[in-house]
Image (cartoon, grey):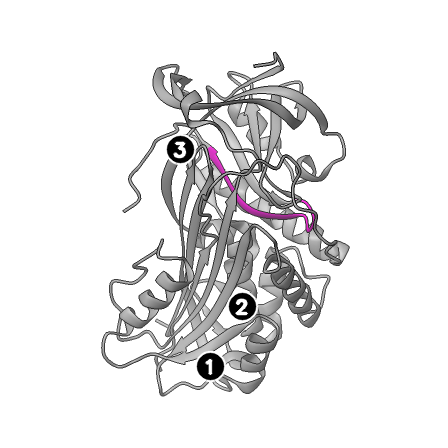
Amino acid sequence: MKRVQYLLIGAGLILAGCGTENTEPEPRAAITLDHTFKNGQSQFAMNLFHEVFSEYGIEDNTHISPYSVQLALLLTANGLADADQQVILETLQLNELELDMINEELQTLVEAFSDLSHTEIETANAIWHIPELEVEESYHSMLKNSLVGEVNELPEEKPEDAINNWVEENTNGHIEVLLAEVPPEIVAYVINAVYFDANWLVPFEEEQTSPSPFHLLDGSTIEHPMMRQSADFQYYEEDHFQAIKIPYEDEGLTMSVILPEEGMFEEVVGDIDSELFWNGEWQTEHVDVTMPTFTYEAEYSLIPTLSVLGMDSVLLTEIDFAPLFGPDSLYKIDEILHKTFIKVDEVGTEAAAVTSVAIEETSAVVGKPFNVDRPFVFAITDEVSETILFMGSVVEPVVEEDE
């Protein structure tokens, strides 16, 4: 039997637009989410970030979308029999909740994000399958009614073009090619795309940007374009780090920038937890911010990462996909890929992520100085729903061309 599934997430394309003179973010309605659900998704986000950082974060910049990976894994969980489903829910820290309730919470979150005044956070989901396969009606109904998804047949000729076109459309053209080809053993892809588009509440002035020193972990120094702004920000500090929140135009959406003191980068990053973002100890302070522009891509195979986080028993082994494809559907998750892009400049932030899960047959005023002139951590979060959308670390603020 041929049985392969790819799960793809194009997570959050954030496109920078024009600035605004408003200094107060657009108010938003409260989002009512279950406390266990919010805690679970925050804990999974931090577990994922810490594991990726431990594997890659000292030598390279990192960037992931926990929200995107969570969505991909939950789409997969909906297609699995109970025992295998529970393994994924435990990894996502959501095993205390019924899957139907988790789907309802996701629906609430997706609908709330799609109703923002100035920010686009749009979610698209799709099942692509060969004509010989048929998606179960119950899964189809869940996908359509709860997660705003669609079911499509893969064309016989150049099926990769159909998928790549869908990906390009749902990432605003930012991710043009996910698949070079669809191998003959592939029978289906489960795809999720998240599109995020936001501007800073107060843009940095481009004429203030100029080359300044940035100190690398090896002790060397490079010259890099640094943005500057002196304004009131939410500010927090502990013994070995400072942090600020740079707001976007809609209430609650911010980029947190965490700046460890010199020589404490690994230790500080290792101690970060989600409570840093949601605790009530941040204070409004006048801060002189100096911060690099940066643009880079990252790519990860998440099979080792998710194995460490608890999914080893459902990876690279035969599992039951009956809820997705009907009886006698024993498939193997063969690969989970996560590709991301991030761009931060004076106007805003642009980011994108793609995750694929492959299943195959068994086989001026002086303020507090906040000079980001050394390695740091960033997180794009929504405080209203307590959701970590993107998170990463920068050891060298490179500016790569976005092709």
- Whichever of labels 3 and 1 marks the residue nearer the N terminus, that label is 3
Q: Residue at x 74, y 55 (%)?
A: 36
Residue 329 marker: 1
Residue 294 marker: 3
Q: Give the x, y percent position of residue 388.
A: 59, 47
Q: Quadrant of the N terminus?
A: bottom left
Q: Which residues are magenta?
A: 383-393
Q: Residue at x 45, y 60 (%)?
A: 9
Q: Amino acid at mark 1?
A: Ser
10 Å crowding of disc 1: few (<14), some (14-19), many (20+): some
* Residue 391, magenta (yes or no): yes
- Disc 2 to disc 1, C-alpha distance: 16 Å
How many numbered markers are drawn? 3
Q: According to the image, label 2 marks what residue?
A: 75
User: Compared with residue 123, is residue 184 higher up or lower down, i.e. above or below?
Assistant: below
Callout 3–callout 1 Cβ contact below 8 Å: no
- Disc 3 to disc 1, C-alpha distance: 45 Å
The secondary structure that most of the magenta stretch takes on is: strand
Q: Give the x, y percent position of residue 392.
A: 49, 38
